Image: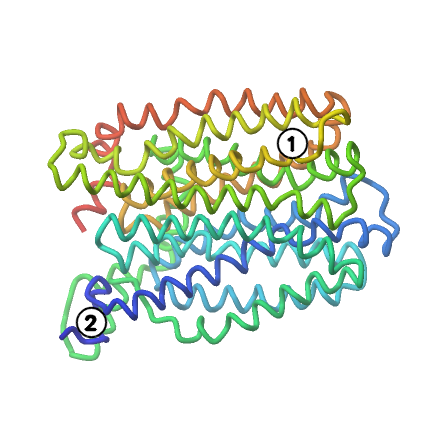
Amino acid sequence: MVEESSPDPYRWTTKKKLFVFITGLVTVLNSTLGSALPSGAIDFIAADFSITNEQQLVLPITTYLIGYILGPILFGPLSETYGRRPVMIWTFVGYTIFSLACALAPNFAAIVIFRLFSGIFASSPTAVVGGLYADIFSDPKTRGRAMAGFMAVTTLGPTMGPLISGYVSSISWRWTFWIALIIAGASWPALILLPETFRPVLLRKHNEIHNITSADASRTTPSLRDLVTRVLTRPIRMIYSESIVLFSCVYLSLTYSIFYLFFEAYPIIFKGIYGFTTGQCGLAFIPIGIGALLSFIVYLAYDSVYQRARSQAKPWVKIEEYRRLPLACLGGPLYTISLFWLAWSAHPSMHWIVPMLSGIPFGIGFLLIFMALINYLADAYGTYAASALGAASCTRSVSGALLPLATSPMFARLGTPWATSLLGFASLVMILIPFAFIRFGDHLRRNSAFSRSAKAG
């Protein structure tokens, strides 16, 4: 029987791996729920602090996403140096403290600043949890399903935010942040019990206990200069030196920023055209959540087809890219179709359910794209998965923070049909990326220094 203290997380018991998996999901839920939680409280915050500038009202969400930019640059690489556990715990301490600060904020400027720091610390799970799962699941099938669950939570979290805040803010907008704090507090017991999963750190500790000398231990304790010049810059270097990372980041950034733009666009559409209340506007996000759940079923169905073809030794399964990327080949068109559906059905003469239902293919497409590309990055870069995912998280947070700022001017100038169609045309171009990866991915991975190093390690 394998010891629970084994320095190889692949050999841990299923029960222990399940605990790590669930704890990872819990931290991601806190992070992503927090990102969109104020969206239903904005009108109440504006009334309380007499804020009338539309650009300022976007800031509680935008600054949180700006925090997402900085976090992955630090926390992904640090988790590959000092281990996943200390990074996860100390960043969650920061998230908890600043969630409390938001609930007690004396003015609008304080909310904006506290949300920035909340976003910085909340960005840790989105960058680290992918690496956490890569640490414990050696089988691509199991790891892929774990990552699919991870991505489902990253979608469900934000869609729950407007629904919660849209109704509780009528009591007090501060309750929006009190709820975030309550959820964070309930998550702490699992996080405290989270074991370290990063193999080099576990091996170093194992060797210290058993007085074994190993060269592997040195990779977890770099000098300060090496930490700054090599480790912390790794996600940035991967963006400009790795074509797979670069183009994945481009596609994920657009997809993600449109998703967060919807937290500004949906009130414009459903309040402006259909006269919805803030709470009812939160309900409009439910179809996106339904689509996210359906995408998980699509993922499992494709995974079943893939595993059956693999057992039959079909030639196409020998191509690594077919393990994940066909999901994005399906998700891209669905995502694009949903945007044109919303663009040309949101009209006073059309029942509100018609544009709202566009959220179902949007949710399916959004999550299939993310499942495919995030899993592909994790598979391609192995030990460096957290840095690759950190690069993806960083770049999509840049666009996710900036594009929503243009929502009100864009929709005011172009109108709902053409503003949303513009997003659809941009998404249409991106559809080509996963097809290109299927064609050229093997060549790109063989010529990737990071991918070769991960496989050698």
Measure the alpha-carbon separation of dots 1 and 2. 53 Å
Dot 2 falls on a residue whose secondary structure is: loop
Is residue 135 placed above or below 252 in the rendered structure? below
The quadrant where residue 344 appears: top right
User: What residue is rendered at 40% in x and 36% in y?
Assistant: 239
288 and 128: which one is in front? 288
Q: Mark 1 points at which residue?
A: 355
Residue 211 % position (x, y): 16, 78
Around disc 1, counting alpha carbons within 10 Å, would you say few (fewer than 14), some (14 to 19), or many (20 or more)?
many
For badge 2, the amino acid type reads Ser
Q: Which residue is at a point 53% across and 50% down the rendered structure image?
A: 156
In-image side of 56 versus 373 (left or right) = right
267 relative position to 97: left or right: right
Answer with mark 1 or mark 2, whichever residue precedes in sequence.
2
**The disc labelled 1 sits on which kind of residue?**
Pro
Label disc, if present, on residue 6 of the rendered structure = 2
Rendered image quadrant of residue 15: bottom left
